[in-house]
Image: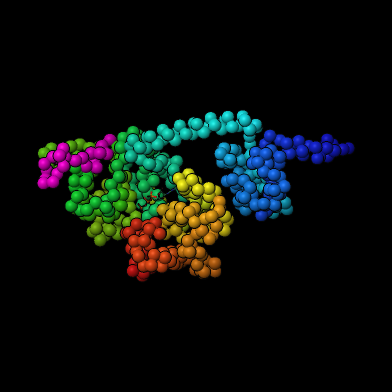
Amino acid sequence: MATLTSEYKDEIFETVFENAYHCFVVVDDQGLVTYMNNSYCRFLELDKQEVIGKHVADVIENTRMHIVVQTGKEEIADLQYIRGNHMIANRIPVRSEGRIVGAVGTVLYRDTKEWMLMNSHIKDLLLEIEHYRNQLKEQHGITYSLHDIAGSSKQMSELKEKIKKVSPGDVSVLLRGESGTGKELFAHSIHHLSERNTKPFVKVNCAAIPEHLIESELFGYKEGAFTGAKRGGKLGKFQLADGGTLFLDEIGDMPLSAQVKILRVLQEGEIESIGSEAPKKVDVRIIAATNQPLEQLIKKQLFREDLFYRINVVQVFIPPLRERPDDIRIITKFILHKVRARTGKRVMDIDPAAMTQLTYYSWPGNIRELENVIESAVHLTNDETITVADLPDRMHPPANIEKRTGNLKEILELTEKKTIQHAMKESKGDKERAMQILGIKKSSFYEKLRKYGLS
Ligand SMILES: Nc1ncnc2c1ncn2[C@@H]1O[C@H](COP(=O)(O)OP(=O)(O)OP(=O)(O)O)[C@@H](O)[C@H]1O
């Protein structure tokens, strides 16, 4: 007996797909469009004949259909930005005999007008949230919150959970990790999530203050305390942070004389400004960060053990980017979005070959270096998509990756060494410039030069 489905297959297909309110697209295993329904064509203002056979990334903004074909993982209810609107996309891989042969994508909106209305409402709300978020950040000296930390690898998810746990309360936190891994971002987030978030967040770069100025920078001075003292005196960082959080960045680079003074404040909870007769109580939470091996510095008597125990109540280690390759794609997209918004240049995506290159690279400068690479690629590309040609030479994979000689640690170290050599070549031996290219700080750059015998 003929069923309704078999008898009117074409008509049903046409009703369900062709003229449905929803947008449908089908791609093959190469990510080439094999079908797009009328609603989608109308919405994109494209001609049906024109889109068939084209790569989906050339047809639909911010699509991930070609990625779903590669990963085989369905993506449901993903927010996709198309033609100035946030749409809800579902992407489902199609399998035949155990092999992925393509993918079907739907973009949900019941009616353009209705969706536009809802969308503009959401946009207004998002703008309002953004406005308040920025206002709060400006008022209290913080630029970032957990919301600004991209990454969904296992390590990153665990890290975010740990941050949520330790943020409330007053416990001192020591953030450790290589240069450019996001320690400052995490320090902001801890403050943001703490009860102190309506009070100031004050950063001290311990490596940047000349030794003779440390005391006045940290504790301030009274008017007339010394020749050249400003009228009215000056507040130190501890007073400025009173009630809030003091972020001691690069604490491993702090001179011993300053370490003694900080320790005293932490033990006694009071400071003495230069020229003042009476000590004053201060209430600050300490978050410290370093990329230095503090335990070794203690052995060499360059860092005080008692200060180490004071600041190291909870330790948070941020793994280098090369140890969490799963994050590279998502952070890259996040950065691309930010650079696009800032520069206004319509660079929408990164092609799969360039993405593979980003994933294989060793990232000695971590996310700061990734930001530099994406920023320069956005400026270099003449296209809407970043390709391998837009990436710097140092990112071309060294032969040892392709041949996979040695264990992972050896491959990573050799890659890091070659990357530094490349950056030195690119900068014609100018070390300052090489540090900029790699996005790493002086201390970690020189440590790596020594490690690889390049100094
Ligand atoms: N997970 C992340 N998602 C998005 N951006 C990130 C992330 N981690 C770091 N960044 C960006 O990378 C840059 C470097 O981060 P940050 O300054 O926090 O690193 P750091 O570890 O404090 O470096 P350093 O030790 O050299 O001071 C910043 O511009 C920051 O916004």
Way the structure is coloured: rainbow
* Front residue of this view, candidates 153 and 7: 7
Q: Position of residue 420 (x, y in %)?
A: 41, 65
Q: Which residue occupies 48% across, 64% down?
A: 393
Q: Position of residue 171 (x, y in %)?
A: 32, 41
Does residue 302 appear in this view?
yes
- Image quarter in which the N terminus is found: top right
Is 451 placed left or right of 228 in the picture?
right
Q: Position of residue 10 (x, y in %)?
A: 80, 40
Q: Main secondary structure of the magenta part?
A: loop
In the depicted structure, whether residue 233 falls above or below residue 120: below
Question: Which residues are the magenta region?
Answer: 222-243
- Image quarter in which the C terminus is found: bottom left
On whether residue 233 falls in the magenta region, the answer is yes
* Front residue of this view, candidates 387 and 353: 387
* Front residue of this view, candidates 444 and 342: 342
Q: Which residue occupies 58% across, 29% down?
A: 117
Q: Position of residue 440 (x, y in %)?
A: 37, 57
On whether residue 183 falls in the magenta region, the answer is no
In the depicted structure, whether residue 367 falls above or below residue 131: below
Is 251 placed left or right of 274 in the picture?
right
